Image (cartoon, rainbow, N blue to C red):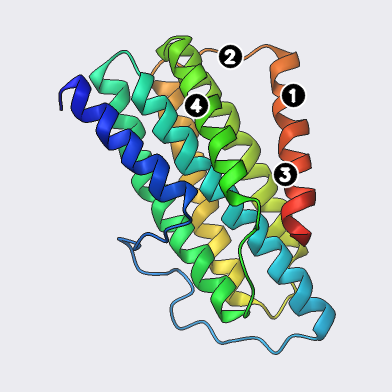
Amino acid sequence: MTPLDRVISTFDQVLRGAAGEVPVARRPNPAGTEPAAILAEDEHRHVAGLMRINHTGEVCAQALYAGQAATARSSEVRDKMAHAAEEEIDHLAWCQDRLDELDSKPSVFNPLWYAGSFALGATAGMAGDGWSLGFLKETENQVEAHLEEHIEKLPASDSRSRAILAQMKIDEAEHAAMAEASGAFDLPGPVKMVMRSAADFMKAVAYRF
């Protein structure tokens, strides 16, 4: 793609993502034939909140990758971002499927999360591929940790949500390993703390709204 093609493609992604368009997964939903759990009202509300957080996280992931790919300096890094983004699209579709099953909605603030994450991704990309990959690695490490936390918080009977989050966790670990192998820089401690604080704020809001 030419630089102009990338600008047009990125702009199209931004509009689609901000509008909340739900992509189609390329891989089968990991929930597969897992039985539907009978959840108490409070369990149902809790699972919906957790899956809304994860859906929002995938909206943010799409924006981050789009921003980073748009400003990546090497075609190799850009291609790796695109490959990881394809798997994140699967995650987004799976989370949407589960929210639909729970008769629940995504976060009303997703357009805001998308815009902010795109700006962060573009900024990381402009800082250089090493820093951009470092940002990706730290993001995926933090996501992997919160997925493990969510898996532990799910009701024991909710095998459908658990199957989705377990596969997402595997993919996120692979993305972090890819970034590490591609020359990711280690981010300064204060930057990691700010990222965790921002993620905690997003999770607190998305759980309810």
Distance in Å between CA atoms under marks 1 and 4 = 15 Å
Report whether residue 204 is seen. Answer: yes
Numbered disc 3: secondary structure = helix
Q: Nearer the viewer, mark 1 or mark 2?
A: 1
Q: Which residue is labeled 4 in the image?
A: 121
Cβ atoms under marks 3 and 1 closer than 8 Å: no
Seen at 59% across and 33% down, the residue is 116
Q: Which mark is residue 202?
A: 3
Of tags 1 and 4, the one toward the viewer is 4
Label 3 or label 2, whichever comes before in sequence order: 2
What amino acid type should be assigned to the residue bearing mark 2?
Answer: Asp
Return the mark for residue 194.
1
Question: Is residue 136 at least partly visible in the picture?
Answer: no
**Residue 10, relative to residue 133: is it above or below?**
below
State the separation of the CA atoms marked 3 and 1: 12 Å
Q: CA distance from mark 3 to mark 4?
A: 16 Å
Which one is earlier in the sequence, the residue at label 3 or at label 1? 1
Image depth: mark 4 or mark 2 in front: 4
The image quadrant that residue 190 belongs to is top right
Residue on which the image places disc 2: 186
Given the current orientation, which residue lies at the most extreme bottom position? 38
Mark 1 and mark 4 residues within 8 Å of each other at the beta carbon: no
The amino acid sitting under disc 1 is Val
| Residue 30: quarter of image | bottom left
Task: State the residue in front, 22 or 164.
Answer: 22
The answer to which of marks 4 and 2 sits earlier in the sequence is 4
Amino acid type of the residue that numbered disc 4 sits on in the rendered structure: Gly
Residue at point 53% right, 49% down?
58
